[in-house]
Image: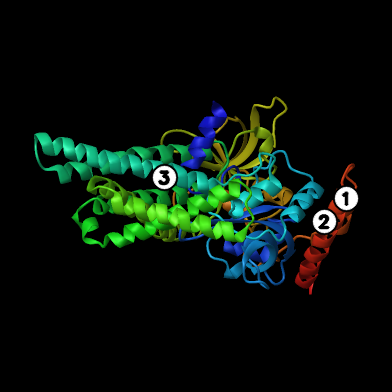
Amino acid sequence: MATLRRNFLEAMLLSPTGKTTRIEQRHYQVIERFLSPGDRIAWQRPWGVIHTAIVLCIDEDRGRLCVYERSKDEDSKCLEVTINIITLEKQWGQLYRCDDDAEQMPLSKKLRIMLDKFGEKGYNLFGKNCQHLVAECTRHEGKESFQTKWFAVNMTIHAIKSFGKSITSEIVEAFFGGAERIGVVTVVAIQIIFFLIEFYAACERLKTGDISWKHFAELVIRHFSMAFFSCIGSALGGSLVGFLLPKVILWVVLSVFGALIADYLLDCFGTDNQYLRYLGWMAGGIVGFVCGCISPDWVIEILLACMFGFAGLFVGHTFGYSASWLFNRSGADSRIVNELSDLKTGDHITKYEWFLHPHCHAIFVKAMPNGTEMKIIKNTYRRGVIEEIVPFTERSVYRYEYQPSECHDSDQTVRNARSKLGEDHYNWFTYNCKTFAKECKCRNNDETDSRAPPQQEMDWDQQFEEMIAEPGLPEEKVEQLSRRFTKMMRKLNCFAI
């Protein structure tokens, strides 16, 4: 039941699922600190699409990645499972690293699945998109797409909104009149209920440490904007404005939707015949077109409300994405700490103090042997800079996340804090607890940047040897995998040049 509840709450949010690390553009210069071969990454595009891929190689000096993805191949120009070289600065959207692969697959097993899928052509929104591919290659749960789940949940929400608007309008019209106004009120009320569920889902992910404060703020801003524009779309779609539009627009939308469903069903049956696929698209499109032509007015009203409301989601996402980018463009990020053992010496933390001081900033020194207390150094109003032992309370402590080149190492941070013990220069505005913690943790602009040592390159040949050493693997399969591995290595060698 707990897993079902978690899956439902995650499906309410248009965001990569599980624990994620937010990688900002300023981190691209030291991207090797954040990514390594085999990592699963996701871009949240401004227009409401999430693209996922697997990292194969990293070129930090030129800001490039070599990724395994379902995308347009640079050579064949068709949609297939391929390896592409991308420049980070040219990518649209917020980049995340997905850290929720608790039962991490061995890289050799990942490589086996990746080679099996390499070169597979085709794309389908419901059953064969980039998220299905990456989940199948990296996770034990198998093939899944969190964006497809979100799409299904929101189609249901819009059906409920549109049907509820139509029903309440008819009931009120029959008894009191003024149906249009009550219909809009119904749409707004239902949308508020579902937005509160989305807000609760975002809070749950924040509490469990899956997302940081900045990610949480982005989710809330985006989903509020999506709810607002979706309300407008649903209200307009079912009103006279919707009926003034040519019905041919609705017919075209239903035809495309029917073709997508037909394509998904053909994938489920494993059909590779291209002509049969064309016939399936035509049949699905015709069925959708006919449904649009023969539908009565009340059905058309509901369909228009759904269509406009869903379009409002993507308009709202674009607007909310821009607003959240302005809100989160500066400052350090923070994430909740669920276990005392997760803290490291020199961490900049905040803890709940009391009602008028909910965020007390401090430098973490060490965990005490009893496992329930911690030693910290902080700047206080009454006693100045002190070192004290305080209890650790689960889900009330947050750790700030800095770019490594921005901060001192752990020992130096503690030395900086201890060198100020006894000072009593507290000022609410210029030298408070937050100012003190940042001063101890962060480097000055004129200090030398310490770059991480270069990562050791992945030995793909060794991984391939481990993969084909699997007992019982047929010789024909080994030859097929070997051919695909050779093609893959040609792409990786081009990346290294």
Q: Which of marks 1 and 2 is nearer the N terminus?
A: 1
Residue holding disc 3: 154
Q: In this view, does 10 lie above or below 317?
A: above
Q: Nearer the viewer, mark 2 or mark 3?
A: 2
Q: What amino acid is at disc 1?
A: Ile
Secondary element at image label 1: helix
Residue 153 percent coordinates (x, y) = 44, 42
The answer for how far apart the CA atoms under marks 1 and 3 are is 43 Å
Q: Which of marks 1 and 3 is nearer the N terminus?
A: 3
The residue at the point 33 percent across, 49 percent down is: 306
Q: Circle 1 sits on which residue?
A: 468
Q: Is residue 192 left or right of residue 113?
A: left
User: From the image, which quarter does the C terminus lie in?
Assistant: bottom right
x then y, percent, for residue 85: 68, 68
Which SS class for mark 3? helix
Q: Quadrant of residue 453?
A: bottom right
Residue 425 is left or right of residue 326, and the answer is right
Amino acid tagged 2 = Leu
Q: What residue type is labelled 3?
A: Asn
In this rendering, is residue 281 above or below 379? below
